[in-house]
Image: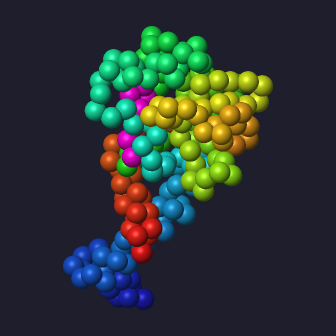
Amino acid sequence: MKKTWKEIWHFLWKDDSWESLIASAAIVLVVGKFIILPVLGFILGTQLPVVAVVSSSMDHGVLDFDQWWEQNQEHYRTFEIDKTEFQEFPLNNGFKKGDAIAAIGKDFEDLKVGDIIMFKTSARSEPIIHRIVEIGDNWVSTKGDNNINQFSFEYRIPSENILGVAKVRAPLLGWVKVGFLQLINKL
């Protein structure tokens, strides 16, 4: 039995074959998906502790903040959000397709205009990650920083559809998922 375990260990972690690489990657994916993410989600209080950004709806492009604000200020004036207030928002420079976002759970009462939330909607299969622009009784409205207008599913999102609040951006780490999704969609 001990010899068998040694052979398996050697195959997975020391063998340089394609078979070993595929087997090791499969184990890492299974452990990550079914052990690490659920434990991390439990600790952070959200069912989606880490997500990959799959669209450019929060991308500020190559513009610095002042240039970006000059082009987008009208979209936020309708929500009575000014430049000074926006500069105080978390992740006020947005994020890009292919970034990974770490999130935590948060009580609805603790949400603020400017927070970036992940929420589910029947309009999309993937969760949406957008900025809160309005808060009501047990609902929020959001808008993507790079979107001119709100989508219809962004009005009055019920609190039970909120999956988490974005806290940390990890540039480029989401490209593993985005690349995989793009590969599957091309097949």
The way the protein has been coloured in the rendering is rainbow
Q: Which quadrant holds residue 46? A: top right
**Which residue in the rendered view is the most extreme toward the left?**
16
Number of marks in the rendered image: 0
Q: Is residue 94 magenta?
A: yes
Quadrant in the picture for the C terminus: bottom left
Task: Choose between 12 and 121: the one closer to the eye.
Answer: 121
Tell me what residue is drawn at x 45 percent, y 47 percent. Answer: 55
Q: Position of residue 109 (x, y in %)?
A: 70, 25
Please report the bounds of the magenta region as a residue range: 91-97
Tell me what residue is drawn at x 53 percent, y 41 percent. Answer: 129
Q: Is residue 5 visible?
A: yes
Tell me what residue is drawn at x 39 percent, y 22 percent. Answer: 71
Task: Choose between 150 and 168: the one closer to the eye.
Answer: 150
Q: Position of residue 76 (x, y in %)?
A: 53, 20
Q: Position of residue 52 (x, y in %)?
A: 45, 50
**Above or below for 76 versus 132:** above
Q: Position of residue 104 (x, y in %)?
A: 56, 38
